[in-house]
């Protein structure tokens, strides 16, 4: 039996594509192994969002090169966004790579592996969704559902539009059918994926147009689906109907990841985000009014070209005002082919570092403070398995997307009532309230 090893970088979209790759390889008779050295096929699903992602990949590819030199019958494949962003450049930079493909060409990997082609191949034309490919899920009760590919935004820092193309939505009926199949297969939680989920359906043909809020309602109606998450919405496109869905539909989680990027309207303009600070704060106010306990998380970039001390202070003000439950913070990283990479007034690395430190410190403080509101409450926890730190305990997540470690007897995929005893910025701890066990 042939074996493969796959390393995934980047976002949840890539994790989803990797599950499809694994499903496809399984159906071709390949078995997954834990070590690259034991694999006939060494695969990478790459990311290109920040420079750090590129640098990490280079190190991993070094090992693949060495293994390939030891045994030239090994096949090395590089898929995903980085591949797409450099296309044939993959083979120029890494001549030992046998097959390279973009995010829309996962199925071409199978074609390559089953052909007798001895020459290296690159596949970079978008040809469709991976949704129809078999999937090997990491967990039986959780699944990704890709609702669209591509992105029509023009954020000046972002490489995604150039790697994943224009937005294409999958038809509503097809998505509903996929979720029904997943539910029948034991899935309890789905995460809907798209670069900008709130513009879902606008590109569908007349007569078949649909909105993201309608999609949420369709998925909520599927028997067996207990939790719906999605990522990411865009502050310019998130409307009241989507926020209302969090209040009105049982399975839509009490968590919204709403990327801020900057709190300065001037910087947001240079980022081409097409919303300002006021619009962002207005969306937050609407969320807080309709779904008071909703967890809010965000992405923030520090040190965008031309960001002054005053601009950064505005970001700090918004952060102080919103008090996020969690936030991913990034130092601006210039990406090839993006407008922001060519802007004058690049911010010096030490200034970026200082700003990052202040941001991280504040975000951490808020996360810890916000998490205290769960202490003393009995929360519904979707059980994921044993705790990572103490296998005698269990781990799961609450609707608000916080991880909980707890003492209890529930099975993975079950919903348990857990009384929360303590909280840190990232995790909660507690004990299963046996009498409050909720139906699975
Ligand atoms: N530099 C730094 N951060 C970036 N992001 C996207 N592009 C860049 C870049 N060039 C961040 C944004 C986005 C998240 C996924 O990555 O905050 O929301
Ligand atoms: Fe995901 Fe963007 Fe990285 Fe591609 S470049 S893997 S879409 S984060």
Image (cartoon, grey):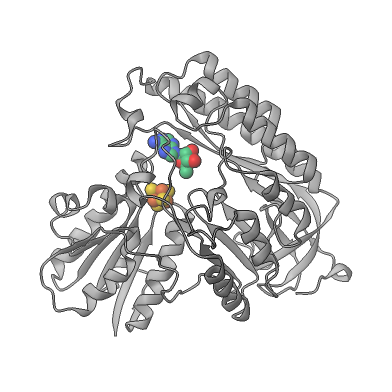
In percent of width and height, residue 280 lies at 63, 32
In percent of width and height, residue 389 lies at 61, 59
State left or right for residue 207 relative to residue 246: left
In percent of width and height, residue 294 lies at 74, 46
> Above or below — where is 41 with respect to 270?
below
Residue at 69% across, 74% down: 224
Residue at 33% across, 52% down: 81
Between residues 216 and 294, which one lies in front from this camera angle? Answer: 216
Quadrant of residue 19 in the image? bottom left
State left or right for residue 196 relative to residue 335: right
Between residues 125 and 419, which one lies in front from this camera angle? Answer: 125
Answer whether residue 395 is visible to the viewer in this image.
no
Residue at 55% across, 22% down: 264
Q: In the displayed image of the protein, which residue is found farthest to the left? A: 119
Quadrant of the drawing holding the C terminus:
bottom right
Quadrant of residue 53 in the image? top left
In percent of width and height, residue 201 lies at 53, 56
Q: Quadrant of ligand 1?
A: top left
Quadrant of residue 124 in the image? bottom left
Residue at 53% across, 18% down: 311
Quadrant of the drawing holding the N terminus:
bottom left
């Amino acid at each position: 039996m042939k074996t493969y090893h796959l390393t995934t970088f980047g976002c949840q979209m890539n994790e989803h594509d990797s599950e499809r790759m694994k499903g496809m390889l399984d159906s071709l008779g390949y078995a997954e192994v834990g070590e690259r050295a034991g694999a006939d096929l060494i695969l990478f699903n790459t990311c290109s969002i920040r420079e750090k992602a590129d640098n990490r990949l280079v190190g991993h590819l070094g090992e693949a090169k060495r293994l390939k030199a030891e045994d030239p019958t090994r096949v090395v494949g590089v898929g995903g966004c980085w591949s797409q962003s450099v296309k044939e450049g993959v083979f120029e930079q890494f001549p030992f790579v046998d097959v390279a493909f973009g995010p829309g060409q996962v199925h071409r990997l199978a074609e390559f592996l089953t052909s007798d082609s001895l020459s290296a191949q690159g596949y970079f034309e978008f040809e469709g969704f991976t949704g129809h490919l078999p999937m090997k899920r990491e967990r039986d009760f959780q699944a990704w559902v890709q609702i669209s590919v591509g992105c029509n935004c023009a954020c000046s820092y972002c490489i995604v539009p150039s790697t994943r193309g224009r937005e294409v939505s999958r038809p509503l009926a097809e998505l509903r059918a996929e979720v029904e199949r997943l539910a029948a297969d034991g899935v309890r939680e789905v995460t809907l994926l798209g670069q900008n989920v709130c513009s879902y359906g606008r590109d569908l043909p007349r007569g078949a147009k649909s909105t993201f809020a309608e999609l949420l309602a369709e998925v909520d109606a599927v028997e067996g689906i207990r939790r719906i998450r999605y990522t990411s919405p865009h502050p310019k496109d998130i409307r009241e109907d989507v926020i209302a869905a969090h209040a009105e539909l049982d399975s839509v989680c009490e968590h919204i990841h709403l990327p801020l990027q900057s709190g300065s309207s001037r910087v947001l303009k240079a980022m081409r985000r097409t919303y300002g600070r006021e619009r962002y704060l207005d969306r937050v106010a609407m969320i807080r009014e309709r779904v008071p306990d909703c967890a809010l998380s965000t992405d923030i970039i520090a040190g965008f070209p031309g960001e002054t001390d005053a601009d950064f202070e505005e970001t700090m003000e918004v952060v102080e005002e919103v008090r996020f439950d969690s936030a991913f913070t990034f130092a601006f990283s210039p990406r090839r082919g993006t407008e922001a990479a060519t802007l004058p007034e690049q911010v010096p690395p030490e200034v970026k570092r200082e700003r990052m430190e202040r941001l991280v410190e504040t975000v951490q403080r808020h996360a810890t403070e916000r998490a205290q509101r769960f202490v003393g409450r009995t929360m519904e926890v979707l059980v994921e398995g044993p705790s990572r730190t103490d296998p005698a305990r269990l781990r799961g997540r609450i609707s608000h997307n916080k991880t909980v470690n707890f003492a209890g007897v529930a099975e993975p995929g079950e919903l348990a009532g857990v009384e929360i005893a303590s909280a840190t910025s990232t995790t909660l701890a507690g004990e299963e309230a046996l009498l409050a066990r909720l139906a699975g």
